Amino acid sequence: MRGSTLALALAVPAEAAATLALPGTVAGAVDAVLGGNATAPGLLLGVVLLGGAAAGALAAAAGPGCAADATVALRSRLLRHVLAVGPAPHGLPSGDLTSRLVGSAADAGGAFPARLGALTALLTSLGAVVGLGVLSPWLAPAFFAGVLPGIVLIRLFLQQAGQVFTRYQEAQSELAARLTGALGGLRSIHAAGAEEREAARVLGPLPELSAAGHALWSTQRRTVWQATLLVAVVELAVLGTAGWQVADGVLPPGALAAAAGWAALGVGFFEQVEALAGVAHARSGLLRVAEALAVPAPSPGCRLLPDGPGELVFREVVVRDGGNVLLGPLDLTVPGGRTVALVGRSGSGKSLLAALAGRLRAPDAGYVLVDGVRVDELTVPELRRAVGFAFERPVLVGATVTESLEGAGPAEARAAYADGFLARLPDGYRTPPAELRLSGGELQRLGLARLLAQQPRVMILDDATSSLDLATEHHVTQALADSTRGRTRLIVAHRAQAAARADLVAWLDAGRLRALAPHAELLAEPDYRAALVGTAAAQEYR
Amino acid sequence: MGRHRESPDTPGWTLLRQQLDSTRTPLIRVLSWSAVEALPALLSGLLISAAVDQGFLAHRPGVGCLWLAALGAAAAVRAYAARAAFPHVAAVVEPLRDALVVRVVRGALARPEADPAAVARLTEQVESARQLTATLLRTLRGVGVTLVAALLGLALLAPVALLLVLPPLLAGGLLFVRLLGPLVARQRAVVLADEQVSAETGLAFAGLRDISACGSQQRVGDAVAATIHVQGKAVRSLGRAAALRSLSVALGGRLPVLAVVVAAPWLVHRHWLTVGQVLGVAAYLLQQLEPAVRTLAGMVGGWVLELTVVLDRLAAIPPTTPAPDRPAQPASGPAVRVTGLHHAHGPAAQPVLSGFDLELTAGEHLAVVGASGVGKSTLAALLAGLLAPQQGEVSIGGVRPHELHGPLRARQLALVPQEAYVFAGTVRSNLTWLDPEVGEQRLTEVVALLGAAELVARLGGPDGVIRDPATLSAGEGQLIALVRTYLSPAPVVVLDEATCHLDGAAEERVEEAFAARPGTLVVIAHRIGSALRADRVLLLDSGRGIIARHGDLQVLSPLYRELVGHWLGSTAQAAPQIPQPATPSAERRREPEDAVGASVRPRS
């Protein structure tokens, strides 16, 4: 247990005890005033007040401290775990994972303070009622006579407000949906000068939102005035009962102060609905974090790469999705230093096979070898020296361009034909990737630069030049060919030119290897031509 | 905003004040009812003291209960006032929310680039501003009034007690104000740290595949973990400031109780206070003053700051002012004229266009080609007046497009971007978006001309309703945008890769139709076909451009030759010999001027 947790565990009950003791202590002090000697009760009151204040201050510091410790621990664990799991095929979507780390972990981190707080508050209310009962057996029934209708009132409110609130939220999400749509067509809207017209369209549900908002207020209005009256009635019933007993001489006058104080603390029970909501929040947060942590992370291997040309071998690999076989069983060898193009219609398993090579996905059966070593037995850094990727839509992760390019500098950027537009950025390589506003083609070139910096034995280009216009693609492939000479390359290809440049084409069809041969030999097959862009067009202009 | 000040002069509070100005009447009513609501707070001590002295301690419990009943009546008045205040709270808060929603929506649509945070702003931040304002209106003013009423009641009941109460209360208040600065700063730090954690985690998790592929789990993990720790540190530091705050609250709220109790025997002995008065004072202090001080401190330290932060965010949206509405000058001069145009994305950046000239006559058809990122879309935006030229001049039909009011500008030039805008509504309202006057017959003609008849029929005809635009494919969306543009009255049309999701045949059909449409056509080309069909081709390269006929450009520019060769795939070597296909539209066109003479000369 960390220091702040211990401090909180001590401070919260101490503060509650002081709060609970206060009415009784004040009563004792008042009665002592009548006796003329208030030194001892005054001292006691001083201890209760100051002790309570000190415990309150400690709790105020320890509560956030404790929650922060727990949140940081949970977040760090979840972060490392998610990174270790990597792009799990059936894992949670990234936005969901982010909300679990940001929101759920914070909710869960507050679990201990929330539970302690709710429990203590509940016990305080209970203690106050017990205090009333001890003071006089008549006071507790007087209290409950008022509290029970209060519970009915709150239930009623929650029901009514729930319906109106749903209506409010529906209007709100309709507005949000319309705004999202308009933002997607923002350039068209600007070009048409239709900003005001479209604002009016987006704002269409606003009157409904406003009406629902007013309805919410009138629901709240009913409950609030009834509750206000009820609390006053409870307090006055208790006070009156106590007063009667003071008049009878059963209770000392100070008891009035005690009764008033404890009645107020007891009524505070109504406010505990919020504290309980906090506990429920924390629990659902914990569940959501635990769910994400339950996804198993692949265990990293411990082997290193032997010297070798970078031969890539798929041995009997199978990938399934539930009962469906998505890929395989499939055997394929990419000889070291050679280029193999993966060709096939969409859904034929090209990207899946490419992902297997670098262990971005684990096969359900079979294995992948680089220079004779299974990729799942390599250490993480060694795996990246073995196999690197460039993607159709690379994601740049890092605070600056330099960082997110994994060490790629101007040389790699030039080789990937990316130095031109990087120079056009206001801050060049120091620009945060989020501010780049790049076209798909520019992003792909940065992805290639990143791959070049990694210098792996086997390079996987998964549709990595698809967004380049043809002139740029031509330059980039030329440059790539120069700077990756001698490396093994597996290229997911859609265009005929890319397939033509490869040493061999692995033609995939419905998850199976249909043929492994040079492009020129396969070109005779109509099915093969249909799987490529550019063959038809090229023939048309011939 | 001042360095450490919770002052009402932040942009957010200025915004709030402006909005509240228009709802002054209900605001005053809310405040008036607050005064009524404070009645029990004012009377509680007085009535309890009377109940004790004249009733319970005088052995007349009936009288005591009467006094308590009077307190009950005061509570009933309070309940009534709370009930009466609600509609006025709603009348302040709901218009505030409406105004903020309008502001966010207008602001989001006025920004040059779509801001994905705008939707969160619309739902979360506006809602949070509404709720916080309501809470402050309902609770803060209530607590403030309670505090004043309790002190007033205290002064009426036992002025001498005031001497014991005020010094610690003021001291606590002063301490609290002193502590507010650091508290505000730390809370702000927590908000910023939260956002940082959210942003970095979001990016890292969106890039899981890339992180795995690059083996950068360690680097990214370390960076994000560091941010997570910074956030934790900020929260702990805020907690420590809150602890000090709670001490100041104890000083202001609890020390008076102790002072009164310690002095009470002496005061009662001197007959300056009766027992009932001591109980009344205790009631004021314990039931009114202390809770009020605590709530006040909590709210000023928490909610007011939160509201400040949220309002500052919303105030950061620039207010939308309608563009200066200059009347269109009588159209004179060529359809498109660009002289000395210069544009760079940033002051230090290499310009994407530099010293750029272009002139197109009415009815001409130009294709723009060049590598990705070379500035084709920037040129389109400049032509459409979406960007103001940094240097040089753009004129469309003799007027500067960026100076025109939006709808007027759209009547001069229609720009169709790559991402089509289709909104939920009828097919007709989507198709006639740029010209609501279009007749039924013309609509049917154009739909058929562009090959959209099948799509429109599938959507239920012109009066069919598109409920969720996301269900349309990208190509279908483009087709709708193209029909709409064809129907627009604008004499100049710019297609900025607006056909990229159509198949080759559909693209050709659309471009042929647009070429035959009266008026000038500029096509930012995605495929070679667009260049082959155009009268002239503009090749953009490194901020400069060459303009010529397709055939001439192949002779003039090695880059263009290479580009065409590459476009044609395996026929690369044969490319320069490809004759310019005679398209029907090309023959109708005015023969372009001397290819070289019309070229775009760099000025640098």
Image (cartoon, rainbow, N blue to C red):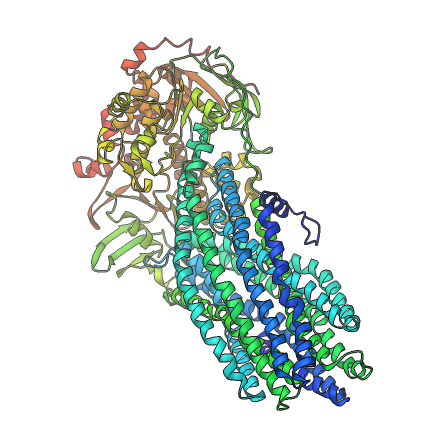
Query: Would you place residue B580 above or below residue A487 in this image?
Result: above
Looking at the image, which residue is at 40% across and 20% down?
Answer: B490
> Which quadrant of the view contains residue A370?
bottom left
Residue toward you, A473 or A176: A176
Q: Is residue B368 left or right of residue A141?
A: left
Camera sees residue B154:
yes
Q: Residue furthest right?
A: B270
Looking at the image, which residue is at 72% across and 82% down?
Answer: B275
Q: Is residue A119 left or right of residue A468?
A: right
Looking at the image, which residue is at 55% across and 56% down?
Answer: B85
Q: Is residue B125 left or right of residue B257?
A: left
**Quadrant showing the C terminus of chain A:** top left
**Quadrant showing the N terminus of chain A:** bottom right
> Which quadrant of the view contains residue B466?
top left
Measuring from the top left, give residue A403's x and y in whole percent.
Answer: 52, 49
> Which quadrant of the view contains residue A248?
bottom right
Measuring from the top left, give residue B397's x and y in whole percent.
Answer: 47, 15
Query: Would you place residue B454 above or below residue A162 in this image?
Result: above
Q: Is residue B352 left or right of residue A95?
A: right
Residue toward you, B34 or B539: B34
Query: Would you place residue B296 above or below residue A231 in this image?
Result: above
Residue toward you, B446 or B21: B21
Measuring from the top left, give residue A292's x and y in whole percent.
Answer: 40, 64
Residue toward you, A227 or B236: A227
Measuring from the top left, give residue B230's x and y in whole percent.
Answer: 59, 60
**Total numbered labels:** 0
Camera sees residue A305:
no
